[in-house]
Image (cartoon, rainbow, N blue to C red):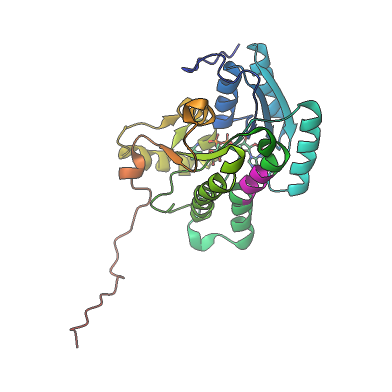
Amino acid sequence: MTIYRSIFRTDLFQNQTILVTGGGTGIGRAIAHELASLGANVIIASRKTEPLEQTMKEIQSAGGKCAMYTVNIRNEEAINAMFDEMLSDHETIHGLVNNAGGQFPSPAENINQKGWHAVIETNLTGTFLMSKTAYNRALRQNKGSIVNIVAEMWNGFPGMVHTGAARAGVANMTKTLAVEWAKDGVRVNSVAPGVIHGHGITQYDPAFIKSYVKMASADIPAKRLGTESEIASAVTYLLSPAAAYVTGETLKVDGGSSLWRKTWQIDDHTNSDKFDGFEP
Ligand SMILES: NC(=O)c1ccc[n+]([C@@H]2O[C@H](COP(=O)([O-])OP(=O)(O)OC[C@H]3O[C@@H](n4cnc5c(N)ncnc54)[C@H](OP(=O)(O)O)[C@@H]3O)[C@@H](O)[C@H]2O)c1
């Protein structure tokens, strides 16, 4: 049996229903486990049934409340259909964790329009559509909280320009929605993970991930990768009443890596032309 030991109070989310996208795997699975261990009625949603079923069963066999729905967050019709079904089974939701996301590594010059759109649609458009639907159909009536998972992209995101642009968009959207929806008691925040050891990084090409993790971990001030639980506890804090006065914020959970870490090797070159107004 999978038991989750949260550091928060065990009845923190009693009588709260919280939707976690991408809750079947990785960081989303850890978030779902933690919220369920704190009394939440957790709903997990993504495209593939199998990981959702597995996580739902894990949570239920540990005594937690969990339901699952399939949805592609890139598709507004599918989101509305999922909300129709979910809201006929559950009265409402009190929280949304926009954790679903994905990208692929590539130098910028090799990304075609299809690949660019796919990453923007999942990470930026999907997060917007889920937030808007949750607000219109639940949160504006009963208050609540949204937490978006973004990424460490404060120095750009060399090697994944598409996701860097999408996540910077979500960090900005977080501020806008926090202001627009404050009148209804809805808070909107984000968590920006550094490199997290877990299911997510196993999805990349093993050769890429080996060199990336080696380069990444060399100069993370914490000298290690993060854990999925370290992201889950930041999300739990932001969803909880302890963060009642926190909105529009993006919390970095990265072992200090955004202050220090190099993510891209710059080959030696002499291609930086100088400008000097005094030169002939
Ligand atoms: N791991 C890291 O180092 C790291 C660092 C920074 C940010 N993040 C972000 O953290 C989040 C969780 O990542 P993870 O590391 O836990 O990876 P993961 O296990 O691959 O989780 C991604 C989840 O998103 C779901 N998903 C992807 N596209 C979807 C879509 N179109 N509609 C619905 N669900 C979709 C996937 O489920 P289905 O395949 O079933 O749809 C999957 O459960 C992602 O946004 C990721 O980019 C991760």
Q: Up-down: is 154 above or below 231?
A: below
Residue occupying image coordinates x 66% and y 43%: 130
Q: In the image shown, does 180 or 14 lie closer to the viewer?
A: 180
> What segment is highlighted magenta in the picture?
125-132
Q: Quadrant of the image for the C terminus?
A: bottom left
Q: How many marks?
A: 0
Instruction: Say if the magenta span includes residue 265.
Output: no
Residue 253 image position (x, y, % from top left): 41, 35
Answer whether residue 64 is visible to the viewer in this image.
yes
Q: Is residue 130 magenta?
A: yes
The quarter of the image holding the N terminus is: top right
Residue positioned most to the bottom: 280
Horizontal arrangement in the rendering, residue 137 relative to residue 113 (left or right): right
Q: Is residue 101 visible?
A: no
From the viewer's perspective, tell me whether residue 33 is left or right of residue 260: right
In this view, the residue farthest toward the front is 183
Q: Where does the image place residue 230, in percent across and percent down from the top left?
A: 45, 27
The image quarter in which residue 81 lies: top right
Quarter holding ligand 1: top right
Across and down, in percent, residue 120 comes to 59, 53
Prevalent SS, magenta region: helix
Q: Residue at x 66, y 36 (%)?
A: 139
- Give me the residue at 29% from left, 61% from top: 268
What x and y, as percent, mark residue 261?
Answer: 33, 44
Between 263 and 147, the one nearer to me in the picture: 147
Name which quarter of the figure residue 59 lies in: top right
Tell me the quarter of the picture where residue 254 sits: top left
* Residue sitting nearer the eye, 4 or 185: 185
